[in-house]
């Protein structure tokens, strides 16, 4: 039970279906996506001795290579340690040491000063194309794993402000993905998920659902959240889904009002990661014309009153 099996199956079923995009430019179809992952997995195994259960960290902004490396880590049977790219390198270094990561991929490969990482951990450039020439016979199938085997080591801050490693198994990720689609919105194969929020967090987890349906994955050219850029992508792709934090959610609506954007192309917006005040949500959805933009109504469980504090 390896979560990478979903990518393997998508590649076998729909090798010609578009998979990865940088802006409007297609980077790979599902057949090529699988091949990239296989060769990157071979690179991890052959060049760096990664074995099942080893931890590999990702400390970089959103990009197509992020998805390639994430699935390559699982393909090799290793554990992904995604780190928020907005953290300071000192904070990221603490996570690397706590996770006992063997490798960390970054933008450019020179984020950490000499001696800042543990002796047994090596920093690599995420654009290292040596991954494609690492092996003439890369692993054709994902490494077998058990449902209880660790897959994603997620670091979060709690009330004490110390980073905590949350252990998500292959079984956890599969159960979450299988339960999410009916609860949120059915995923259509023609849908495109746009990564405006960091892939190190919930946005990356939502990739699993879309890989399972062999849907499209779009990284904005800015590799960041820009409302006007997202509107253009929505118009171009249609049927887009994106995960946003509440502040991003409000920013989309305000920029949409400013530009006169009518919501064309947006199918689903999922928000989370932080509380949102019910009064703010009410103002967004009910008190201006952009309630129609999101095609949403306040859910029955959300009772808005002057005494409410927050809603998730």
Image (cartoon, grey):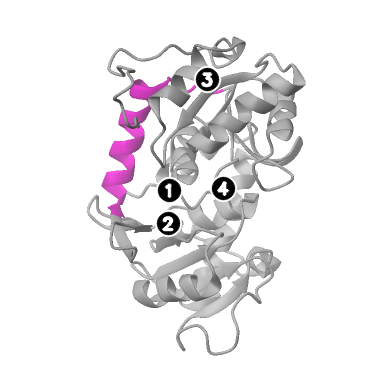
State the residue in front, 136 or 85.
85
Q: Which dot, 4 or 3, sits closer to the camera?
A: 3
User: For numbered disc 3, what is the local secondary structure?
Assistant: helix
Compared across the picture, whether 31 is left or right of 152 comes to right
For the residues labelled 1 and 2, say whether their Cβ atoms are less than 8 Å apart.
yes
Q: Which residue shows up at 69% across the image and 41% down it?
A: 220
Residue 291 occupies quadrant? top right
In the picture of the structure, the residue carrying the numbered disc 3 is 284
User: For numbered disc 2, what is the local secondary structure?
Assistant: helix
Residue 77 occupies quadrant? bottom left
In the picture of the structure, the residue carrying the numbered disc 1 is 4
Q: Which dot, 1 or 3, sits closer to the camera?
A: 3
Residue 31: x %, y % from top left:
61, 42
Residue 244: tell me if it is visible: no
| Mark earlier in primary sequence (4, 1) | 1
| Mark earlier in primary sequence (2, 4) | 4
Q: Which residues are magenta?
A: 168-189
Residue 283: x %, y % from top left:
50, 18
Q: Which dot, 3 or 2, sits closer to the camera?
A: 3
Q: Which residue shows up at 36% across the image and 57% down it?
A: 156
Q: Residue 178: say if magenta.
A: yes
Spatial CA distance of label 4 from label 3 is: 41 Å
State the residue in front, 25 or 99.
99
């Amino acid at each position: 039970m390896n979560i990478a099996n979903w990518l393997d199956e998508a590649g076998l079923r729909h090798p010609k279906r578009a998979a990865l995009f940088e802006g409007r430019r297609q980077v790979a179809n599902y057949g090529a996506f699988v091949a990239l992952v296989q060769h990157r997995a071979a690179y991890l195994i052959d060049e760096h001795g990664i074995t099942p259960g080893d931890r590999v960290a990702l400390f970089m902004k959103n990009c197509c290579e992020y998805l390639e490396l994430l699935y390559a880590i699982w393909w090799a049977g290793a554990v992904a340690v995604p780190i928020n790219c907005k953290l300071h390198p000192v904070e990221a270094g603490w996570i690397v040491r706590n996770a006992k990561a063997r490798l960390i991929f970054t933008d450019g490969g020179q984020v950490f000063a000499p001696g800042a990482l543990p002796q047994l951990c090596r920093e690599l450039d995420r654009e290292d194309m040596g991954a494609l020439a690492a092996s003439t016979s890369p692993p054709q199938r994902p490494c077998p794993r058990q449902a209880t085997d660790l897959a994603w080591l997620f670091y979060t801050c709690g009330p004490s402000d110390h980073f905590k490693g949350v252990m998500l198994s292959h079984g956890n990720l599969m159960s979450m993905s299988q339960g999410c689609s009916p609860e949120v919105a059915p995923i259509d194969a023609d849908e495109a998920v746009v990564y405006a929020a960091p892939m190190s967090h919930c946005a990356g987890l939502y990739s699993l659902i879309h890989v399972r349906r062999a849907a499209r994955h779009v990284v904005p050219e800015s590799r960041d959240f820009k409302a006007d850029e997202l509107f253009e992508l929505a118009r171009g792709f249609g049927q887009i889904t994106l995960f946003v934090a509440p502040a991003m959610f409000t920013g989309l609506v305000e920029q949409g009002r400013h530009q006169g954007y009518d919501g064309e192309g947006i199918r689903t917006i999922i928000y989370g990661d932080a509380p949102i005040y019910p009064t703010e949500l009410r103002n967004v959805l009910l008190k201006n014309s952009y309630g129609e933009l999101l095609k949403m109504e306040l859910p029955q469980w959300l009772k808005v009153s002057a005494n409410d504090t927050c809603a998730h």
